[in-house]
Image (spheres, rainbow, N blue to C red):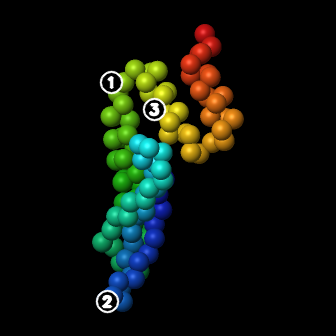
Amino acid sequence: MTGNLQTKKLASGKEYYYMVLNFRSEDGKRKQKWISTGLEVRGNKRKAEAMLREELQKYKNDLYSSDRDILFSDYLQKWLEQQRSSVSQVTFEGYSLHIKHPVA
């Protein structure tokens, strides 16, 4: 998961920071989640960056904690499906062979 800060100008004319989180869903499609920081742009860049780092860490911890009780082979299958849309077909097939026939 990655993230960045964006500014958004509201109808009132004030600009605010928003966190934009980029991730892949269970089916491998790219998704974005916009979260308001509630901070005005002027003078709050460091605070907004700190909030973004905290939010990314929170999602990272949630991602790994949900897979703690999963078999390694099942985790590899899940990972492989997530990679399908981001690698070439040849690379995907190579990964598939390595997962099915691991080297000792």
- Closer to the camera, 104 or 42? 104
- Residue 7 horizontal/vertical position (percent): 44, 75
Neighbour class for label 1 at 10 Å: few (<14), some, many (≥20)?
A: few
| Quadrant housing residue 91 | top right
| Disc 2 element | loop
> Pointers 2 and 1 in contact (CB under 8 A)?
no
Give the residue drawn at x 55%, y 39%.
83
Q: Position of residue 55 (x, y in %)?
A: 36, 54
Q: Label 2 vs label 3: CA separation?
A: 45 Å
Q: Earlier in the sequence, mark 2 or mark 1?
A: 2
Residue 98 locus on image (x, y percent):
61, 22
> Looking at the image, is mark 2 or mark 3 earlier in the sequence?
2
Residue 70 spot, x, y in % from top left: 36, 24
Considering depth in this image, is 16 or 20 the residue closer to the camera? 20
Badge nearest the viewer, 2 or 3: 3
- Residue, x 66% and y 28% (percent of image)? 94
Mark 2 closeness class: few <14, some 14–19, many ≥20 residues within 10 Å: few
Q: Which residue is mark 2?
A: 12
Which residue lies most toward the right here?
90
Which element is circle 3 on? helix
Q: Amino acid at mark 1?
A: Asp
Asked whether the beta carbons under mark 1 and mark 3 sit within 8 Å of each other, the answer is no
Please state, as top left, top right, bottom left or bottom right, where the C terminus lies in the image: top right
Please name the residue that numbered disc 1 is placed on: 69
Residue at left offset 41%, top offset 78%:
8
Answer with mark 1 or mark 3, whichever residue precedes in sequence: 1
The vertical placement of 94 against 18, above or below, is: above
Tell me if 81 is positioned left or right of 57 in this view: right
* Residue displayed at 56% across by 40% down: 84
Determine which of the numbered discs, if any, sits on residue 78 in the image.
3
Give 27 or 62, whichever is nearer the viewer.
27
